[in-house]
Amino acid sequence: IVEFMQTLIPAADFDIVEPLRKKLERQGITVLLSSRVEKVETKGKSSLSVLIHNGENNTKKTFDQVLVAVGRTANKDLLNLEKTEVATDESGYVRVDEYQRTSVDKIFAIGDIVGPPMLAHKASYEGKVAAEVAAGQLAVFDASAIPNVVYTDPEVAWAGLTEKEAKEMGVSYKTGEFPWAASGKAAILSAGEGKTKILFDSDSQRILGIGIVGPGAGDLIAEGALAIEMGADAEDIGLTVHPHPTISETIAAAAEVFTGTITDLYVPKK
């Protein structure tokens, strides 16, 4: 795997992505970060010679096949928007308000063409809002958190603010982190490399964001997204009884680490 950025999933926090990189390398997959492919040439009848720039070095490697995955763009060029009065922003995305209405009152837009995150569940939510508004119902797109999931093994998921975003925005926060190595269910699943991390506001202790890495992280993240939408604080999450033994317990445990009430893990006082 050749990745131009310093981490496999730049949008997620480094510590949430690192278990994925480590597992890939244990499986014999070489992961080259801060690297780029300079050239791909055919070699013989069935091979490809790839020139990779990594740091100060150029390396040539031979492969049977090469998969190029450098992101995606919206199919807005297929819409012939230039023939309408629908306004777009400087990046070419269709401008919409909180009702998904474009600059043309009776035209609504949803999905990738209105900008990131380019996710199916975000587009579905927007579609519901647009349909209800068009039908004269009261609806608005005001989601506080859009969950992101990368369906790798282990899965990586996050919602709300990441630590990187919080630092860039100057948001004062503290974290509660629970390693799955201390989870009974994770031990059953051989998923001890997993981790659940929650960001809380330093003053109000309300949840700001959550990151999870491990099997089923994409399912677990929904609880974090709900907590963000409800404005839950650390005690709300920690005092919610979670079934045992399950991975969902790690969400409550992460909150308890933050409040200092954890009994499943020894955490030295800072």
Image: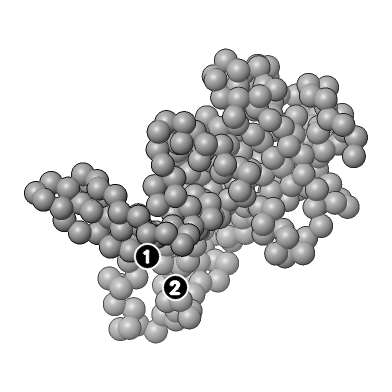
Label 1 is placed on what type of residue? Ala
Q: CA distance from mark 1 to mark 2?
A: 8 Å
Q: Is residue 177 visible?
A: yes
What percent of the width, then of the height, locates residue 130?
A: 48, 61
Left or right placement of residue 67 versus residue 101 in this view: left
Mark 1 and 2 residues: CB-CB less than 8 Å, in contact? yes
Residue assigned mark 1 = 74
Q: Is residue 124 visible?
A: no
Characterize the local packing of mark 1: few (<14), some (14-19) or many (20 or more) Cα atoms within 10 angstroms.
Answer: some
> What scheme was used to colour the molecule?
one colour
Task: Tell me the SS state at disc 1.
Answer: loop
Quadrant the C terminus occupies: top right
What percent of the width, then of the height, locates residue 198?
A: 72, 42
Q: Earlier in the sequence, mark 1 or mark 2?
A: 1
What percent of the width, then of the height, locates residue 192?
A: 60, 25
Label 2 is placed on what type of residue? Tyr
Characterize the local packing of mark 2: few (<14), some (14-19) or many (20 or more) Cα atoms within 10 angstroms.
Answer: some
Of 23 and 72, nearer the camera is 23
At 60% from the left edge and 21% from the top edge, which residue is drawn? 186
Please identify the residue farthest to the front as the structure is shown. Answer: 57
Q: Is residue 130 above or below residue 266?
A: below
Q: Which mark is residue 93?
A: 2
Q: Which quadrant of the figure has residue 237?
A: top right
Q: Is residue 185 above or below residue 131?
A: above
Left or right placement of residue 264 versus residue 120 in this view: right
What percent of the width, then of the height, locates residue 52?
A: 35, 57
Q: Which quadrant of the figure has residue 60?
A: bottom left
At 23% from the left edge and 53% from the top edge, which residue is drawn? 49
Of 81 and 213, nearer the camera is 213
At 56% from the left edge and 37% from the top edge, which residue is drawn? 19
Task: Tell me the SS state at disc 2.
Answer: loop
Of 169 and 47, nearer the camera is 47
